[in-house]
Amino acid sequence: MKLNIGCISGDGIGPEIVAEARKILDKVALVYGHEITYTDILMGGASIDVHGVPLTEEAIQTAKASDAVLMGSIGGNTTTSPWYQLPPNLRPEAGLLALRKALNLFANLRPAILYDELADACPLKKEISSAGFDMIIMRELTGGLYFGERYTTEENGLRKAVDTLTYNENEIRRIAIKGFDIAMKRRKKVTSVDKANVLDSSRLWRKVVEEVAADYPEVTLEHMLVDNCAMQLVKDPAQFDVILTENMFGDILSDEASMVTGSIGMLASASLNDSKFGLYEPSHGSAPDIAGKGIANPIATILSAAMMLRFSFDLDREADAIENAVKNILKKGYRTVDIMSEGCTQVGCKEMGDLLADEIR
Ligand code: IPM
Ligand code: MG
């Protein structure tokens, strides 16, 4: 199969982790007889440094022309990096938001899994973590507060800022359908998270989710308020299968869920539209403090590449091979510093990539 992959290395540890993910993809291509072409795409700080803007029209077109996009991470230190002296619409993150919108990537899947081998890294009490957990957050990605009207003004000498949270029923329906579809392939439970005791947008969310649920009689639907969900994630994470939620709530809850695994360096993500196209990136950020030190954990990016093979190319066998390689390497006791524990062998970013590539035969 011919795979035409757009590649956003980005900022911070991005280039290091993407290099390892490409190493793994190349090994998969070799073993399973595929042909991969990568086209580099500048985004975030890397694009600002060259073009003065975090995303060019040309970059959007290159991404659109790819079958799928693999991304590292974007952004820098928000207090020290000159990128953050620029107006908000020219900062690195604006590039990512613009790309999500331009490609209509409305469905963001963020799995949070407690790996057996890494159970010790889980910051929860043993009596909670021993139940294990394996959830996926289905976050709406192109609506809500992130894309509503916003402005800052001054009225009678008083500074005022406005952000708007808007959803129409179509935007809610299409993400709900994605949520229920994925639940059907899992443990058939959807927890729809909202703030329906306060927000109109949440009350509409609840109604539309219930309408969609009617088409999925096998799936159990429950509603949960977002503040309660934040609490339940640390109290009883095993109760969750699919968490379905709007953009801002999903941003916050997905960070919490990943922290609860204790190994954010292991968590992949996919952002999908209505076609096979997707943008695949680790759930973690650009970690500017450790950039260039060769110690970053490339596994989240490598698992994102596996998600890409599965969702965009239907290459399940190849995706399995990558996921099994990760499990084997963990079993053999190799760890990057972020997931290091006693008795294990600590390796750097590149070494981890080499070890995983060797596992794919
Ligand atoms: C994420 C990030 C982004 C978001 C930032 C970088 C704009 O936090 O992907 O979760 O808020 O969506
Ligand atoms: Mg976030």
Image (cartoon, grey):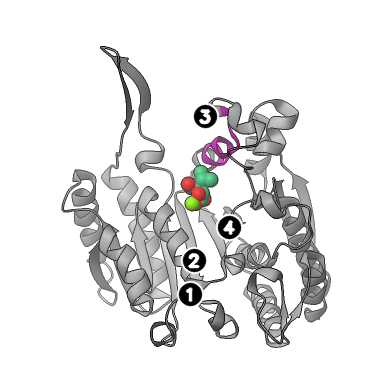
For disc 2, the marked residue is 259
Q: Position of residue 67 (x, y in %)?
A: 65, 52
Q: Is 260 covered by the magenta stretch?
A: no
Q: Is 93 covered by the magenta stretch?
A: yes
The amino acid type of the residue labelled 2 equals: Met
Q: Secondary structure at mark 3?
A: helix
Residue at 60% in and 85% down: 117
User: Left of 309 or right of it: where is 361?
Assistant: right
Give the CA separation, mark 2 to mark 3: 27 Å
The amino acid type of the residue labelled 3 equals: Pro
- Prevailing secondary structure class for the magenta stretch in the rendered image: helix
Residue at 43% in and 44% down: 142
- Residue 323, visible in the rendered structure: yes
Q: Position of residue 332 (x, y in %)?
A: 73, 87
Residue bounds of the magenta highlight: 90-99
For disc 1, the marked residue is 123
For disc 4, the marked residue is 284
Q: Position of residue 290 (x, y in %)?
A: 71, 55
| Earlier sequence position, callout 3 versus callout 4 | 3
Q: Nearer the viewer, mark 2 or mark 1?
A: 1
| Earlier sequence position, callout 2 versus callout 3 | 3
The image shows residue 123, relative to residue 41, as above or below, that is: below
Name the residue nearer the viewer: 358 or 262: 262
The amino acid type of the residue labelled 1 equals: Pro
For disc 3, the marked residue is 88
Residue at 36% in and 53% down: 249
Q: Are marks 2 and 1 in contact (CB under 8 Å)?
A: yes
Q: Secondary structure at mark 1?
A: loop
Q: Nearer the viewer, mark 2 or mark 4?
A: 2
Q: Position of residue 266 (x, y in %)?
A: 60, 69
Residue at 43% in and 53% down: 251
